[in-house]
Amino acid sequence: MTRLSSDHINLINQRLPKLEEHYQSITGKSVLEIAHFASGTDFLPLEQRSKLTVASIPISCGDGIIGDFSETVALVLKEFAGVNTFVTECTDVAGFNEALVKKADMVFMADDKVCLCLNLRTGAHSDNGFATGRGFAALLYLSAHENITEEVLVLGAGKVGAGAYHFLQAKHVPVRWYDLKESSPHGLDAQLLAGDWKKREWNYIIDATTSPSFIGADQIKAGGIISAPGIPFGVSNAAYKKAGLVIRDELETGIMSMFCEASKHA
Ligand SMILES: NC(=O)c1ccc[n+]([C@@H]2O[C@H](COP(=O)([O-])OP(=O)(O)OC[C@H]3O[C@@H](n4cnc5c(N)ncnc54)[C@H](O)[C@@H]3O)[C@@H](O)[C@H]2O)c1
């Protein structure tokens, strides 16, 4: 997983209202509806959501706190889900304790390996990697009007790629995948590995890798859809221009999909 930078965070803060408009225009659904669709959970009405309190806990271990990360997670949840949020004053275990003392219903926290949401009332939880994959697969599927008959290529078979792959398979969408390691610890079918993916133009691509600008114009059909959660951005300028739609955000879809997964039975 690539760490977000402060530049990413500043960008996210500025664009939240525009993202809602953009995703509505390409999918016909709000960010919250997309996240529920991705996680397969029932839509929580605002009346219930507005009673929830979510704590965002800064975690200082590993490479340390990314400036304003916890604040931005709280902002995303407030903006798109309408829940009450606060960032704990303390970090780490003391921050978790603060969330309990202040009677938070859910907590969000991230270190260098895992970004986790835990529902303190029900025990339901969600890992950002898989949730992000499901979210970006849902964005692609909805943008294609829930009607995909051609194979979708999933690049990268870490948690994000695996989340996307399993979401699409559950929708009976034909999927192929490729990872530099040519294997995955997350149960992707080895028979569907597309070792020769570069030799083909695809109508649908999900980039869940950590490689920059490696998807060329020769790999995407004119007017095709690329859903690209991978950081850094894996789509070359030429492929970007040739595609009909390139879907990307660095945090919002993943955080909202986590919220929806972990808010079940809340
Ligand atoms: N946009 C978001 O909200 C969001 C959320 C979570 C993770 N991410 C990003 O998504 C990416 C994937 O996350 P992850 O947790 O699954 O990471 P990961 O490191 O577990 O998996 C990435 C996989 O991509 C493969 N890979 C790298 N370059 C490749 C290439 N050129 N071709 C094929 N495979 C290649 C690697 O071998 C690896 O298995 C990371 O960049 C991460 O930072 C974005």
Image (cartoon, grey):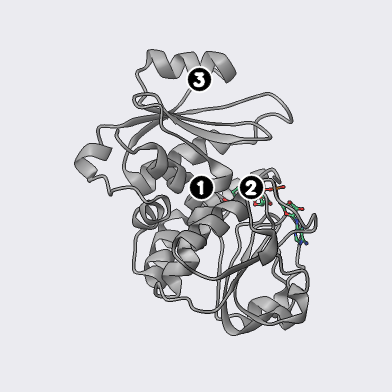
Task: Give x and y (percent) for residue 6.
Answer: 65, 43
Type of amino acid under label 2: His
Residue at 50% x, 18% y: name it: 96
What residue sits right under mark 1 in the picture?
131
Secondary element at image label 1? helix
Type of amino acid under label 1: Ala
Residue at 38% x, 32% y: name it: 85
Residue at 46% x, 68% y: name it: 141
Lower sequence index among marks 3 and 2: 3
Secondary element at image label 2? loop
Task: Give x and y (percent) for residue 76.
Answer: 44, 45
Quadrant for the C terminus, please: top left
The crowd level at tag 3 (other Cα within 10 Å; few <14, some 14-19, many 20+) is few
- Mark whose residue sits in front, 3 or 1: 1
What residue sits right under mark 3 in the picture?
89
- Against 64, residue 134 (above or below) is below
- On residue 186, the disc is 2
